[in-house]
Image (tube, coloured by chain):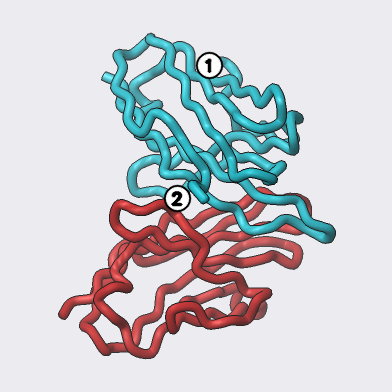
Amino acid sequence: AQRVTQPEKLLSVFKGAPVELKCNYSYSGSPELFWYVQYSRQRLQLLLRHISRESIKGFTADLNKGETSFHLKKPFAQEEDSAMYYCALRGTSGSRLTFGEGTQLTVNP
Amino acid sequence: EAGVVQSPRYKIIEKKQPVAFWCNPISGHNTLYWYLQNLGQGPELLIRYENEEAVDDSQLPKDRFSAERLKGVDSTLKIQPAELGDSAVYLCASSKTLAGGLDTQYFGPGTRLTVL
């Protein structure tokens, strides 16, 4: 079975502060990990995926297989980063995406 | 490009009534997904189609839910009869099937269902 846990439902930071959204997963094989974001009144969209090893909008995430984590980080948060963030896992057996419950990030001015 | 299109965007019905949701995927995307998103939760897969074939419907409550993708393009998800607990957002997504795996899933805006 595959499972994704986002321990924080709400996260609030000030503009310019570092931000880290936590994601832990449970999967017996080699998973593919994603971060999806949903801005207010917009559809769910892919932010980044671990195999790309890229930085999108200043966000990065490193897959740590030892700790089974895929935390999302940004060194200097901006107000426009305020959104709902979902961590998701795709196993090797198919395309089923398993999502976490999401973290609502609020960046205060 | 319009992206994944869903209709209606909102639907309010009384319990025991039927309801149907429609999805038009991105052109060229052969894989289509229906997800259920309850309030405060992440999306959960209901069914996945590869062209017109349902290849993963293990999470679809088949006593009241049904889906079809007759020509491998548009899809319809139906609930009959609806129950109070079906109130949620129903998301459609699509992706291409590429050699070695699947491309990114692109989501529609969702249909918010309220069952009274």
Q: Residue at x 74, y 29 (%)?
A: B52
Amino acid type shown at disc 2: Gly
The colour assigned to chain A within the rendered structure: red
Q: Residue at x 39, y 28 (%)?
A: B8
Q: Which residue is mark 2?
A: B42
Q: Closer to the N terminus: mark 2 or mark 1?
A: 2
Q: Where residue A9 sits: x, y (%)?
A: 33, 61
Whether residue B89 is situated above or below residue A97 in the rendered picture: above
Side of B47 where B16 appears, left or right: left
The colour assigned to chain B within the rendered structure: cyan
Query: Mark 2 and 1 residues: CB-CB less than 8 Å, in contact?
Result: no
Q: Which residue is mark 1?
A: B64
Q: Where residue B21 sits: x, y (%)?
A: 47, 25
Q: Secondary structure at mark 1?
A: loop
- For the residues beneath circles 2 and 1, the answer to whether they share a chain is yes
User: How many other residues sit within 10 Å of disc 2, few (<14), some (14-19) or many (≥20)?
Assistant: many
Q: Residue at x 38, y 18 (%)?
A: B83
Q: Is residue A73 visible?
A: no
Amino acid type shown at disc 1: Arg
Q: Where residue B99 sits: x, y (%)?
A: 84, 58
Image quadrant in which you'd find residue A77:
bottom left
Q: Is residue B42 visible?
A: yes
Instruction: From the viewer's side, name the closer residue of B92 and B15.
Output: B92
Instruction: From the viewer's side, name the closer residue of B95 and A61.
Output: B95
Q: Where residue B47 sits: x, y (%)?
A: 63, 34
C-alpha separation, residue under disc 2 versus residue under disc 1: 22 Å
Instruction: From the viewer's side, name the closer residue of A77 and B108.
Output: B108
Q: Chain of mark 2?
A: B
User: How many other residues sit within 10 Å of disc 1, few (<14), some (14-19) or many (≥20)?
Assistant: few
